[in-house]
Image (tube, rainbow, N blue to C red):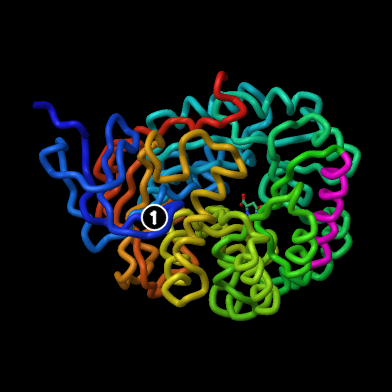
Amino acid sequence: MKPTFDLVLKGGEIVNQDGRGLRDLAIRDGKIAGIGSFSPDQAEETIDARGLTILPGVIDTQVHFREPGLTHKEDLESGSRSAVMGGVTAVFEMPNTNPLTTSEETLRAKVAAGHHRMHCDFAFFVGGTAENADRVGELERLPGAAGIKVFIGSSTGNLLVEDDANLARILKNISRRASFHCEDEPRLRERMHLRVPGDPSSHPVWRDPVAALMATERLIAIARKYGKRVHVLHISTGEEIGFLAKHKDVASAEATPHHLTLVAPDCYQRLGTYAQMNPPVRDASHQAIIWEGVRQGVIDILGSDHAPHTHEEKHHAYPASHSGMTGVQTLVPTMLDHVSKGKLTLERFVDLTSHGPARLFNIAAKGRIAEGFDADLTIVDLKRRETITNAWTASRAGWTPYDGVEVTGWPVGTFVRGRRVMWEGELVTPSQGEVVRFGETLGG
Ligand code: DOR
């Protein structure tokens, strides 16, 4: 008799919407087919998962994979390899490539370039600009679109919408949740003289907490006026946590592992320009409040803001050095280390990296271990002690700000729609990445 299931993972600890427990997981045709107790003869293949913990696949909703145009830093293949090596099963990629992803044509080209070449599933943000503001309502609904992303403050690349009038035009025309980089551009311009040549610790002085809060306040006022849902990326200040706690009906918020792990001035002393990113890593007082935002639920999700640059680009003297750090591969191990130290529970980690992204972005059939959902799994060993190294990093950039850092908790397996893509640090199945589907655009 033909076995009922393609695969059974036996004896692992499943962390799920109904808690944690030892259960078997059955997979058929790339989907979860059952959670319970199954015998090996019910399956074509059985994997012994005893001692391991099985999480719903980690969805990283903020990565920069640099293709097209900046592929000396990264491309869709290398970035997604880095993702699955770190236990990430789906990514949303950002539009500040060259050309910018601001049209149907550039979005379709990215989707075609990623299909069955990326190792994880994927969607792409479309950049909102003054030029395409009247068309964002169509662009956000194209297949493979994660929604609209707007830079209110300038960062890498030249995507920028700094004024309220154009922000309002974009918000008026969207119906999905859009994502925003919030730093007030006029204030950044005024304060440029505060950058100290050669000293990246002046980066958070220049791009100060007021600049972040001002842009976030402007955004929420416009979102409220038009009744739109907005997502504030990479929260870096305590002030924004307090403010956003009053606006949870319209606003969701992301924290990055960098802002929760690195701290000024130590990170600039140790890492120099390798710690330089936008918005900047700030001092311990901000970090403590961002952690409080994680505990209180003001923070909805984690995103890595994986933003690779080459050693050479990082070695330019500040402020010519490029802003951004790699992070897609280290999201799981750095955050599991925080779990091991009691900074957050494993259930909250799953809420931040699987349930949260699915809820905010209305992702179809991902983000839960539940019958009928895609069999996307992040399998971890919570007890394993490992040292993160540059050599382990699959990113083309070849470095991580956590080189030499020992962590407790490690990703040992990545399954994407039932396929074992990574196991014990090896890429085992050739790339089969496909577009993530969304509730709002299922027919598209
Ligand atoms: O530091 C950053 N780098 N922040 C961003 O918002 C963009 C990113 C990049 O693309 O390099």
Tell me if 186 is positioned left or right of 242 in this view. Answer: right
Instruction: Give percent across and percent down for residue 158.
Output: 72, 43
Q: Quadrant of the N terminus?
A: top left
Three-letter residue code for mark 1: Gly
On screen, residue 66 above or below 174? below
Tell me if 213 is positioned left or right of 427 in this view. Answer: right
Q: Splitting the image into 4 quarters, where does residue 26 fall?
A: top left
Which residue corresponds to mark 1?
86
Instruction: Give percent across and percent down for residue 417.
Output: 35, 36
Q: Which residue lies furthest to the top in this view?
A: 443
> Image point 65% across, 71% down: which residue?
292
> Image point 49% across, 49% down: which residue?
354
How crowded is the residue under tag 1: few (<14 C-alpha within 10 Å), some, or many (20+)?
Answer: many
> Image point 54% across, 41% down: which residue?
92
Magenta residue span: 207-225
Q: In which quarter of the image is the C terminus?
A: top right
Q: Can residue 309 be seen in this view?
A: no
Residue 360 located within the stretch drawn in magenta: no
Cβ of disc 1 within 8 Å of ligand 1? Answer: no
Q: What element carries label 1?
A: loop
| Main SS of residues in magenta | helix
Instruction: Give percent across and percent down for residue 155.
Output: 70, 52
Q: Splitting the image into 4 quarters, where does residue 43 fall?
A: top left
Instruction: Give percent across and percent down for residue 329.
Output: 43, 56
> Image point 78% across, 56% down: which residue?
183
